[in-house]
Amino acid sequence: MTANKEKLVLIGNGMAGINTIEQILKLAPSRYEITVFGGEPYPNYNRIMLSYVLEGSKTIDDIILNSWEWYKDNKITLHTGTNVTHIDTAAKTVTTDKGTIVPYDQLIIATGSNPILLPIPGKDMEGVIGFRDIGDCSTMMDAAKQYKKAAVIGGGLLGLEAAKGLVNLGMEATVVHLMPDLMERQLDPIASTMLKAELERQGLKFLMEKGTSEIYGGARAEGLRFTDGTELEADLVVMAVGIRPNTAVADGSGIEVNRGILVDDFMRTSAPDVYAVGECNEHRGVCYGLVAPLFEQGQILAKHITGTATLPYEGSMMSTKLKISGVDVFSAGAFMDSKEFTVIRKQDEWKRTYKKLVLQEGKIVGGVLFGDVADSAMIQQWIRSETVMTEELYAEFMGTAAASAKSPLERIAAMPEEEIVCGCNGVSKGAIMNAINEQGLTTVDEIKACTGAGRSCGGCIPTVGSILEYVLGDKYSAAAAKKAGICGCTTLNRDEIVAAIREKRLTTIREVMHVLEWSNTEGCSKCRPAINYYLGMAWPQEHEDEKDSRFVNERLNANIQKDGTYTVIPRMYGGVTTPQELQRIAEVAVKYNVGMVKVTGGQRLDLVGVKKEDLPDVWAALDMPSGYGYAKALRTVKTCVGSLYCRFGTQDSVNMGIELERMFERLDMPAKLKMAVNGCPRNCAESCTKDVGFVGNDGGWEIYVGGNGGIKPRIADLLCKVKTDEELKEMTGAFLQYYRENAKYLERTSDWVERVGMEQIIQTVVEDEKSRRALNERIGIALAGLKDPWSEVIADTEIREKVYGNVGKLNG
Amino acid sequence: MGNSTSSTSSASFGAAETMRTFRIGGLDDFIVRIGRTVKVEGMEIAVFRTSDNRIFAVENKNPHRKGGPLSEGIVSGHDLFDPLYDLKINLETGKVYAPDTGQVRTYPVTIQGDDVEIGLTV
């Protein structure tokens, strides 16, 4: 069967090429036998989001657009780390740098572009790079770990994004720019000045009107020397002076090349059955370096190659957005003042916003936005359709619009269906409308999830919202009125749900969902565990824990691993164990052949890789209570040796830790909770990164709350100082209960403390004695009658069998 | 729970494919909305009893590229939220809901009296 298929070969495994393949697969799913060659060792990723990877807000995994599985599922043969070196257009074959020769019936070149490296002395030194691919990103991230000073040559889009990323990585980054204004190819001097001021506020440094004459140093770059004789120290030099179409493969193959590979309106090159798409080509004298045109070209090429009717490609309008968090810049079409243009502008130095519209003979031909880019979609639309300026449009642009102005909906109606709305992911208006109609979508989030529109830079989200409104018509207002609830099943937020639980005395999840009119009758994996917690918190005595609404770890009292095995962490109160316990742990580890015995960060031992059906046996053999290492509850109380043995110790931190752990263990919390007790201010048990931390001194204890060492590290705040152990326990109990009663499910103390503020917490827990007593009473009720879950399972044959698949063995 | 009471062969679609049914237990062996794994013919199958007392059987293999089990997921209606990556899976069809993609193998289940049986193509 495959023998009959046409052979389609793609050179270049990037966004332009793979997007074209995706379009082709949609039009002719099984027509081609497809082979893809890519120079990088990754599947196709979103190159325009590299800035976010560098900035740290996304990981490399986040920006992968097509997984390895995608290639497999579509039966595409992918050769990564392989470059095509020659095309024989007569024999219709390609030759790779590995020496293989592959025949084609149709060939697409999508080799993108290369960063331009200035031909100056020192450009080949270590520590001198471009900013183009994941490899460059990794180099920068590694450099930031060792070195302090970075220089970025080039104050354009890419240079600024690179410099911001380096600042975020902790480097001192200086942007060196040849021209007097940043991004002078997209911005006028006013916007450029405002941009520079904003970036300086964010920690970037600038050297303007400096030409780099050489890079000095030894094996590694040490700095830049400028044409005026001055110097700048730098351990890392990023060249971001521009890009050049990568035409290498076409050059030696007799395919016509100018700046880029020359193509006609259907992306055909001078050789038969050879096409070029994306940044590597040159169409009507233009080489595009932005993403939206690539998708427009890809769409036309896919249609052409599969014999589907298509209009010719007539070029794209260029528009630009800077991808730096918190700096909003937009530019499209003409942006500079000039005699032939009429300019409308509005600058607000207090709000730091700027907007400008450029007219030519009354028609809108360009615009610039700074600070607030909400109008970007509107301006793009105006430029594209060469809209004539009117009083209404003027009023709309200047924000003095009366109700009569043309609404966003009217603009959407006028937009052609094939127009790309989301440039980052190549999603057209038609595709969004189809998704809304066919899948009954009612929110922008759903559109994002289904079509990918707005998933990357988010700039098109206002337009996507307008399309939704346009398609839904009357139904829209109802859908829009829905505010965001705790999950997709409800529009109610945490406080409204808890209030209803208390007021209406709701005691089961079913009741909550029924009375509060959940849209999904049995809820989802987000709301079910949350409601279960809120019910247990509100009705500690009445509520029966609903195991089927617990996340696997809390249902099985063990922590699931990616292979379906579990980890077992027994309690070691205060991080103190005995030789007998250690002996039992060792015996169990051997008997059940656990994959790893791990000392945890919380002073305990973790048996990793236990089979689900063995869990009850392992627990029984350990004969120790659960350490709750899987739960949204008190995990560990870390202690230092304290006054028992330490010569610096002023308080008995070990026994205080053990006492606290015994006091508050097993109680459900909104999120996991860690404590630490220190015998002196040396803080060896690191209380500053714990949810509740205690520091002993000669006269008593200091209590710190809201610390976190995890995803978002936060140093704890002082709650209060106390003199006696009794006071310490009282403050702790009140704080924990106040947190339990007020935090959102999954909200750690660090986020909660930030949200409500220490002032209110101190007032309620420390200063108001009455409320402190009431909180302690309530936590006392909640703590009463809690049992060790492991012993409960061991004693229950039915649960052991039906939930764990532990059939009748149980040792002993 | 004794399984493997193998029985009839029904060849409704062509002679080559033979569907054999296996008893995997009684209805009470399955707790509502808490999954359970059974092994049949060397296959690991995740079995779910939904709140309307229907039983669904799927291959106990997470469609996520990192793999893992499914039987410990949260059951909602006829949908399953996978325990490791929170993919939402339709237990009737085995299809993963958008924006994620994937397919889980499903097995036909019949409940006859107290016998829960699943069909496997052998």
Image (spheres, coloured by chain):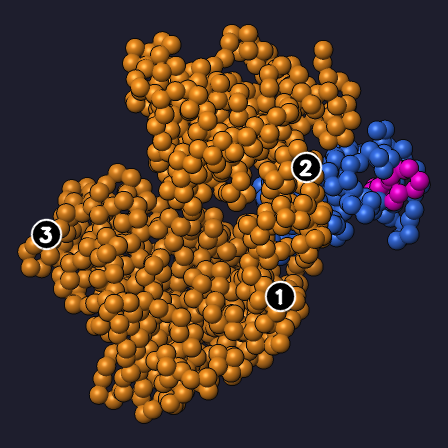
Residue range in magenta is: B110-122
| Residue B31, image x, y percentages | 78, 36
| Residue B82, image x, y percentages | 64, 43
| Residue A266, image x, y percentages | 48, 77
The mark lying in front, picked from 2 and 3, is 2
Label 1, on which residue? A441
| Residue A635, image x, y percentages | 51, 28
Dot 1, crowdedness within 10 Å: few (<14), some or many (≥20)?
some
- Confirm whether the magenta stretch covers residue B113: yes
Q: Is residue A806 above or below residue A236?
A: above
Dot 3, crowdedness within 10 Å: few (<14), some or many (≥20)?
some
The mark lying in front, picked from 1 and 3, is 1
Amino acid at circle 1:
Leu
- Give the mark nearest the N terminus, 2 or 3: 3
> What's the CA distance linking mark 2 and mark 3?
71 Å
Amino acid at circle 2:
His
Can residue B89 be seen in this snapshot? no
- Give the mark nearest the N terminus, 1 or 3: 3
Q: Identify the hue of chain B.
A: blue
> What's the CA distance linking mark 1 and mark 3?
58 Å
Furthest-top residue in view?
A: A580
Tell me where residue A694 sits by quadrant.
top left
Furthest-front residue in view?
A: A770
Q: Identify the hue of chain A.
A: orange
The disc numbered 1 marks a residue on which chain?
Answer: A
Closer to the camera in the image, A320 or A797 = A797
Label 3, on which residue? A231
Disc number placed over residue A543 in the picture, else none? 2
Closer to the camera in the image, A339 or A222 = A339
Q: Secondary structure at mark 1?
A: loop
